[in-house]
Amino acid sequence: MSPLLTLAAVAVFAPAAAALLLVLVPPLRKQGMPAAIVTLLGSVAAVVSAGRILLDRLGAGHAAESIVTPWIIVANKPLAELGLLVDGTSATMLFVVCLVALMVQVFSLSYMSEEPPAAYGRYFALHALFLFSMNVLVVAPNLLQAFAGWELVGLASYLLIGFYFHKPSAAKAAVKAFWMTKLADMGFLFGLLWLFVQADTFRWDVPVSHELANVVALMLFIAVVGKSAQFPLHIWLPDAMEGPTPVSALLHAATMVAAGVFLVVRADPLFALAPFARDVMLWVGAITASFAALLALVQTDIKKVLAYSTASQLGYMVTALGAGNAFAGFFHLGTHAFFKALLFLAAGSVIHAVHSNELADMGGLRKKMPLTATAFTIGALSLAGFPGFAGFFSKDLVLHSVEGKGGWIPWVLLMASAFLTAFYMGRVLIKAFLGAESSKAHHAHESGPAMAAPLVILAVPALGSGFLGAWLASSTGHEYELHFASMTPITATVLGLAGLGASWVVFGSGGTAPFADVIARLDRESWVDRSWELGYRRVMLGAAAVLGWFDRYIVDGVMNLFGWAAIEGGQKARTLQTGLVRDYAWALVAGAAVLALVGGLK
Amino acid sequence: MSSLSQFVLLAGVLFSIGLYGLMTRTHAIAMLLSIELMANAANVLFVVFAKAFGGAGQIFVLFALAITVAEVAVGLALVMLLYRRYDDTLLDLANEARE
Amino acid sequence: MSMLLSTIVAAPAIAAAILLALPASQRLAIRVVSLVGAIISLAGSVQVARLYDRGVGGLQLGEDYTLVPSLGIHLNLAVDGWGVALLLLTGIIIVTGVLASWTVARRDKDFFVLLLVLVAGVFGVFVSQDLFVFFLFYEIAVLPMYLLIGIWGSSHKVEGQGPFRFAWRAFQVGGKEYAAMKLTLMLLVGSAAILVAILALWNEAGGTTFDLTALQSHHFSRQTQMWTFPLLWLGFGTLAGVFPFHTWSPDGHASAPTAVSMLHAGVLMKLGAFGVMRIGMVLAPDAAATWAPIVGGVAVINVLYGAMCAANQTDLKYIIAYSSVSHMGVVMLGAATLNPTGWNGAVYQMFAHGIMTGLFFALVGLVYERAHTRAIAKMGGFSHVMPAVGAFFTLACLSSLGLPGTAGFVAEFLVFLGAAKTQHAWWAIPGVLGAFVTAVYVLRAVKTIFWGPKPSGEFAHLTDAQRTEWFAPVMLGAALVVFGFWPRFLLDFIDGTSATFLNRIPQVAEVFFP
């Protein structure tokens, strides 16, 4: 095994070892802080290895390195393999994931400190499990291992959303997230099965016909819609905010939800053969980007604003993938991971300080929490595509790739979303950090270094990772050019600045969003969510009730009918035995008579 | 009409009387008597056919008589028990096993 | 001649005999003897796995004792790759089952005697290479269940509904006696069908031998195959919960005591599926190929219908019992694929489901002993008071819904892949849908039972697993994860045997009406 692959193995198995240790040694886990240290050690090892791999990979068009070992054996041949694949894409993703995970874990040290030790330990054990699962997905050399990692991150997500399992709302959100993604994952599974049946492999770069590619790509895309919270399966993501805020930052903003995008980037050779699937992605992405941005505008919960914003940004990435520019999607994934994690952690810092998620309980925090306010502003400007910030470069690339596709409509939708993004982020900035102090914000103060350090560290890539585009492109084998003087970046910049300005005009004076009522009516409560709820309760549980009744009272009823018939028949037959000698004598005579008659007739 | 057929007729009449008694009487003793009549009808036939065609049929009659004695003893003992239990010898009374 | 296999079969039987000689008051001794008997069998099974040469495959570790020479009946024991996997499963389940029964209070001696006799029968089935002895062991495994449920079971009341509600008047539906009687009668009807088929095959092969290898080499006429196969399928299939002959399963499992549910759902249902594949499909290969579309179609109904029925249950044990019906459908679906992928998956699913459902019933037993209710609507927040039980229950659920990293995934994935490879690729669709429905009902159960606010009132002082109660969850839970990440250990055994048997089955099936 080459040194590079050894490093990759460390990145995967260090968190796994941490998770295993914490599962197998309950006392360690239940003491809280030791568990956190174990997990952090695993994450640090993973980050260092991932960083080392990235340095080795970046900038040069190295060939991919991989190693596989047979996993499932059928007919004396390995049907499925597990292994490690290291190339520019996985090296970048690995580093982003590990770094954000480490930052979030450090942040959690302080953020979760009020939890009882057992819960604290459980929290960090789950983080280790998540990092392991995510890395399994990232280094997957084939679709099957990707699926395994995909499902395992879903498990980690489920358990972390349901971390506060005593809250019914958190329990509901966790189960809902699992069901929605599992529903979509059926697409992944069907795609896998069909690909294997037709092409006899799970490899990423299998040469297939257009027809097969379209079918498999569409199937995979269904899973992407679920995992990356695209319309109409996006509804689990806002609910997932029931989890602890650092979890939202890591799983439901920076890394896990981006797994869908990563999957498509990875399976790019397949998607390149599937023009129809790409068209679908283009439209689904654009609709999600604009729809979610609209909904973000009316949320009163700071985490829900960020959740819808995440769905919206994932929509950008999916649109880019649909436009055929996997690198644009991947680049945006990377920058988004940093600035969105930063935003969520800053929001977490605020929530920790004011003990509330509601924007109305915040306000004027700029003075009380200057560091957090600065970090949040950097994240927000990056998200809004402010020139020079990371989000500006990647969003520009996305918008460029969409130019002219689908009759410019996706482009228009994304442009409108760019305006809305700046508008709603301006709203949050103004409501939370400017203006008058609310009563709850009065006692707020900056948190300790464990929470401050990740903000500072993440602010650096949120600001500057945009400049790494060329480097990243060359290491993943793509073309990258900047086109600042063309129409798209100028329009986007103008719209972004206009959005910020508009939010100042509207919200600076304490107003509410225009058309808030109309947008609220578009909110998930009104129809998407309710349709799914209806589908679950009426269709699925209804069918279950019908079938359950049918089984108990018809199928089993028939079985009981046999029993009943035997008992009833026995009762009837038993009365023939009267116990009276006289009756038997009569029967004797009658029998003799019959025999005589039969004999006589013969 | 030969004497053989007269004896067979006699046996038939005896048997029929016994069967009729068994089918219509309800008193245990009367039914026991009816069974005895039927058994004796068979005995008559044994003797008659042995006389007419040879063979050792009479010997079975002796066996049958001996067994009948034992049977009557058991039967009467049962009738005694029946009477003690129900204060009557109506066999229909002993019907607990039915339900 | 190694005596390993006969030791595995005899150990529980001898332990049962020793128990008979012990006074009923020696309660600890009774348990220790039972446990030792079970552990000897498990250790023997592990030793079999070590000795079995996977490179060579086929039947190994053979033993042969003549029983009835005139009819060609031999006590012929040997093990193939499937047998190794299922011996391991049975060993694990019986050891954990004995440990899970540690607290049986009433007539405990009789309980352990019957349990051990039953498991001796199960071991016997998996190593018998003589059809007569196979059937004998099969009956030994099935019959003690009547007493085990009828005496140590639990009852509840069920109101009759629907067009056949008048039939409910005839017996106490929901009672343990009813459940025991229904289970026994249905399985015995199945046994009768099996016996007819076995005798027909024996007769056509010349009436001189019951030896499975000899019968395998005899080519039965298509006509005989065509009517014996359905008898074997439905006869064994009744025990495997094949629709519509699965209805003994919910009532039986719900009424049975913990260890009996574990053994019954965990191992005995596998006897049925094993019988269908090992006897039915291997001895009547042409008919199996012709009947496969029907077997698979019914299996698909099992998977989805069982899952939907489970989604409608409010009693925890009924949920698990219906999930068994659904998961055994996956086994039968794998069997119906008649390709190595599906067959490996079917046998792997037997193992995975055995472990998983054993874990389920062990945990349900723990919960029931404490909360004295099985109605999930009454429960809530149990993870606050029994976190470990909650964690293991979640693990079992994850395997049940086929999460990668658990044994359930490997099995279900192989079966669905095998199904997709057949001419009836659509089988995979209801299969995968069934797995989704499973996710719905198991996670809803977890949420209702274990999540939510801290329980108050009668449930506030429930305790987590204690002392001997730990063994079953830990062993079974660990097995689920180990065999989820490391399926090769078992698949290497299973794979060779599947290939051997599949060689006999024609790849192009004759249809019913040519």
Image (cartoon, coloured by chain):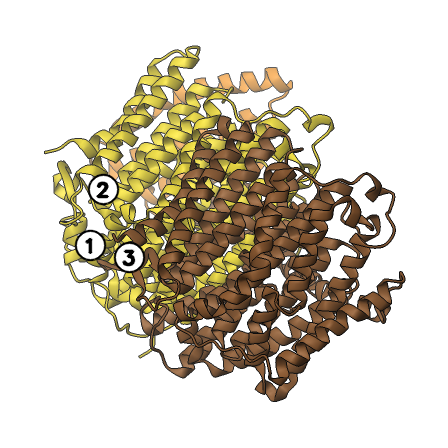
Chain colours: A brown, B orange, C yellow
The residue depicted at 31 percent of the width and 26 percent of the height is: C39
Disc 2 residue type?
Answer: Ser
Q: Residues within 10 Å of mark 2 (few under 14, many from 20)?
A: many
How far across and down, in percent of the image, does residue A238 sit? Answer: 68, 57
Instruction: Name the side, left or right, on which C279 lies relative to C69.
Output: right
Query: Quick check: C125 above or below A337?
Result: above
Query: Which image quarter: residue C118?
Result: top left
Residue C209 or residue C368, whichever sits in front: C368
Q: Is residue C316 left or right of residue A496?
A: left
> Residue at label 1?
C203
Q: Residue at x 63, y 21 (%)?
A: B88
Q: Which residue is identified by label 3?
A: A67
The answer to whether tags 1 and 3 share a subunit is: no
Query: CA gap, disc 2 to disc 3?
Result: 43 Å
| C-beta proximity under 8 Å, tags 2 and 3 | no
Q: Is residue A599 visible?
A: no
Q: Nearer the viewer, mark 2 or mark 3?
A: 3
Q: Which mark is residue A435?
A: none
Marks 2 and 3 belong to one chain:
no
Residue with the mark numbered 2: C128
Mark 2 belongs to chain: C
Label 1, secondary structure: give it.
helix
Image-quadrant location for residue A387: bottom right
Quadrant of the snapshot with the N terminus of chain C: top left
Q: Nearer the viewer, residue A11 or C294?
A: A11
Q: Secondary structure at mark 3?
A: strand
* Amino acid on which the number 1 mark rests in the picture: Asn
Kindly indicate whether the residue at mark 3 contacts the one at mark 1 (C-beta within 8 angstroms). Answer: no
The chain containing the residue under callout 3 comes to A
Q: Secondary structure at mark 2?
A: loop
The CA span between labels 1 and 2 is: 20 Å
- Residue depicted at 48% across the width and 48% down the height: A131
